[in-house]
Image: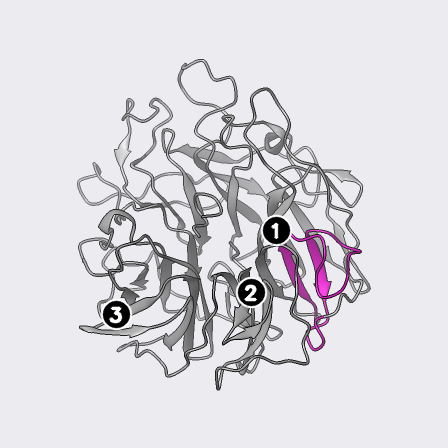
Amino acid sequence: MRRLGRLLVGSGATAVAGALVVSAFGLVPAVAQTGPVSPTPDTGTPALAPSGSTEQVRQLVQCGSTMYAVGSFTQISQNGTTSTHDNIFSFSATAPYTITSWTPSTNGTVDSIALTSDCTHAYIGGSFSSVDGQSANNIAYIRTYNNTLVNTFAHGANGEVSTVLLTPNGHLLAGGAFTSINGSSSHHYYASLNPTSGKDDGYLNLNISGHYVYPKVGFNSTDIFKQELSPDGGHVLVEGVFTSVGGLPRQQIFMLNLGGSHGYVSDWNSTEFNQHCATKHPFYVKAATWSPDGTTVYVADTGLAPDGWKGTFPLTGICDAVAAFPAIRAGGLSHYWVNYTGCDSLYSVAADSTAVYVGGHERWADNAGGCNAAGSGAIPAPGMGGFTPGSTGGTLLTDPSGTVGLYSRARGLGADDMLLTSAGLWIASDNFDGSTNCGPVSGLAGICFLPYS
């Protein structure tokens, strides 16, 4: 396990907050839908098979009519049939969600996947040393029409590659814990690679450095964890452990501008990201996403409570919460709204025009008055929640009684990825402690699909 919320990130996001249906270079506008998504999932989707150990789907990405799933798992079940899949597989994005014959394998966790625009090839990043028996350290380029590695692409990083993302202007952005990738030691933790050769193309030169230091802080080291492309394809949100990016002070998250000749750090920033959470959670902004119109950034956080918290209420800061910020490329920004779980972690977030969806192992929402207990006004929302979007949003969507969150799922370790497509919301999670329920339906360990009505 690398750390909670990434068992065994990245939203190497090639699909974006309901505004884009994936793929790599060509970003296809999604069909407008009337949301929010249904709280009742479709049945028949593939699921993690019981294995006696905790396994996890780390990321889901759609390319064309096929869904690709990566993570840390060994077997997938569907409609009573179990098949072997080592950390990566694909299936039809529409019912009956048939698993394809594509069976590549890795000997370790795959954190992230990005696909070429024609869906014939995929880039994968993670913590592995071989792909289909061939040497490949933490990054690889593989064919999706068979199980083979593309040997003309360099495939060697000296640390975990947590996230891979293909940009519209032709760069493969790879982030993680590495200090050398595909023969280059020039750009630590976050590098731009030529999509054909895998070599560092020099598009990024950010000199990322630093880690979080405060009294009794838990161990943390410089790392890039996740990244999310903007709806217009011109900007990327990047989360991780750092204190300096491109010569500018940044913590937890920064916005990258995809310039013509090089990528550079945007002025977008808030001092709220400089505030520390509990000592065991020095890195807490685990996920972010954009509103479909690109005007708002939503973040999902771990962190328990502010560092040095004295047990007073209501909670402050953005620890263990979902929060909305303006996406204006300027400094000194403040949140529009924050909704607290009450000291339970969130790991994923997605947004359409009608709702902001979050997933984690939370028990409540509207819980600024409690910590590991339901405070005044808290509403049960186990495993996931939906909130009204925009600058004046933050209201939990509830069932008709108004006493329970509209959405729920088995908490497990926590939903680690969410993908919105024109058809609905896909949720990647785990089977910890026998977690299989999504909404009122069981048997959905690891993968859940909530369709638009």
Tell me the residue at 25%/48% (across/down): 410
**Disc 1 or disc 2, which is closer to the eye?**
2
The image quarter in which residue 335 lies: top right
Q: Does label 2 or label 3 sit earlier along the sequence?
A: 3
Q: Where residue 26 appears, x then y in whole percent?
A: 60, 75
Q: Residues within 10 Å of mark 2 (few under 14, many from 20)?
A: many
Inspect this view and state whether residue 46 appears: no
The circle drawn on residue 129 is: 2
Left or right for 107, reference 429 = right
Give the answer, above or below, for where 329 lies relative to 311: below
Q: Does label 1 or label 2 sit earlier along the sequence?
A: 2
Tell me the residue at 26%/42% (across/down): 405
Residues rendered magenta in the picture: 171-198
Q: Where residue 40 appears, x then y in whole percent?
A: 22, 58
Query: What residue does disc 1 label?
Result: 237
The one of 368 and 4 positioned closer to us in this rendering: 4
Q: Does label 1 or label 3 sit earlier along the sequence?
A: 3
**Disc 2 or disc 3, which is closer to the eye?**
2
Q: CA distance from mark 1 to mark 2?
A: 28 Å
